[in-house]
Image (tube, rainbow, N blue to C red):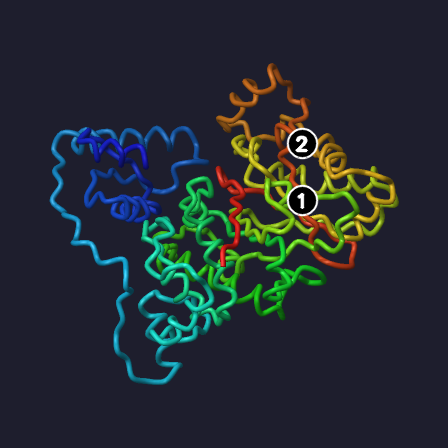
Amino acid sequence: MVDQLNLEKKGIPTVTIASSELVSLARSTAFSMGVADMPFVVVPHPMGGIPLAEITQKAKDAYPLIVKAAIDWKSVAKMPSPKPTYPAQTFTFKGTTAAVNEIFMERGWSLGLPIVPPTPEKVAAMLKGTTRAPDEILGQLKPRMSSLTVESVATAAVMAGCKPEYMPVLVAAAEAMVDPMANWGGVATATGSVGALVIINGPIIKEIGIASTQGAATRGHHANAAIGYAINLLAMVPGGSKPPQQKKATLGSPMDFVAWIFGENEAKLPKGWTTYAEDRGFKRTDSVVTIMGIWPGINVVDLWSASPQEHSTWFSRSVSPLNSVGGPCFSVQLTQPHIIGLGPEHLDMYVKAGWTKEQIAKTIWEKARIPFSSWAKGCPEQVVFREKFGEVTPDSLVPITLKPEYLQIVIAGGSGQHSHFFAPFLKASPISKVVRK
């Protein structure tokens, strides 16, 4: 779709084929990227996972429409005049908080959860939590391609019930979301149950009360909950990730309301170990926010293993059938970082045996594999696999990533024999930003 848009902007005619379920997303994507009108040929959904005869018939039906669109189509729509990015528009409303919530919901300005009315006074008070200028543009947030300002981040923070001291973390999170390597456009419009994983490192954890130990990612922690809620408000309101038009999740998940967010349990780091942020090139004294678009996290419960080898085998068996979770038909994830949220009790097992972080990742990587025959026969990725691994047989074991270095480890949570596995969404890299006050 983006390729067609770029060609259209250069004056090269194209015809875009879209399924009946996804054409609304295609149209809104074109509009958000400055193209008011494009020639679309709509094919009944679905376009994949159907018999060859049905595919052939759909192609025959679509062909004359494609030819007609290529020859006869002419654009008639025009882009509206752009609205100023700053200051944000306001309106006057008299009524109860309940009435405000109702009107925000009707206009698509909330997620369906209660919000704090973002009055100019409350937004101004929230902005006192950061030295960043309110009119600073952090970038364009997909899919709507809205220019995200510090003021718009403060507005979402107010609505989510944040405290002003949370603003530096939220601004850093927003900077990560607009980074092209985050593939936020894919995360925000995917048909899968995809959401944001947020990991926090450094002094800011204690400074604002980010939960990082027992139950760090569950309820009862105000900073985690409010920041996670504000991130999704940014995703839907300025970002435009709203179902069913732009957000095409088949079912979705609770991550669409509050992002999966926790601080690394740095107090449990063994002597000589680095934090997750240090592994990514930052200093121990830096406060860092990392965001990655993920498939639903996998809880790896292991109450039985008595050695690192046993636990590594159990962990790998828990995640390898999923083979990057998004598959088995997404070989692109072989070169993407996956995150192991290692629970402190499982960590202790490794530490007592003298294992390093690199040794843990390498052992799990060596074991986390599935037979090539497990991959769907229609996957074009089968060709990719042969390019990457040479000639393969049905019994050839395919690793979860191409290198053990793609398995990144963060110490997550408190007591209990549970660890977690977070697989990335397609082309969604973990993006880390320093918290600037």
Q: Please name the residue shown 64% across and 29% down the image.
A: 403
User: In x, y percent, where is residue 66?
Assistant: 22, 31
Residue marked by disc 1: 340
Q: Amino acid at mark 2?
A: Pro
Q: CA distance from mark 2 to mark 1?
A: 12 Å
Residue marked by disc 2: 404
Does residue 264 appear left or right of residue 67 in this picture?
right
Q: Please name the residue shown 82% across and 43% down the image.
A: 350
Does residue 334 appear left or right of residue 168 in this picture?
right
Q: Which label was assigned to residue 254?
A: none
Residue 2 vs 198, above or below: the answer is above
Does residue 36 appear left or right of residue 159 in this picture?
left
User: In x, y percent, where is residue 423?
Assistant: 59, 43
Residue 203 vs 117, above or below: the answer is above
Q: Please name the residue shown 34% across and 53% down the image.
A: 137
User: In x, y percent, where is residue 183?
Assistant: 44, 42
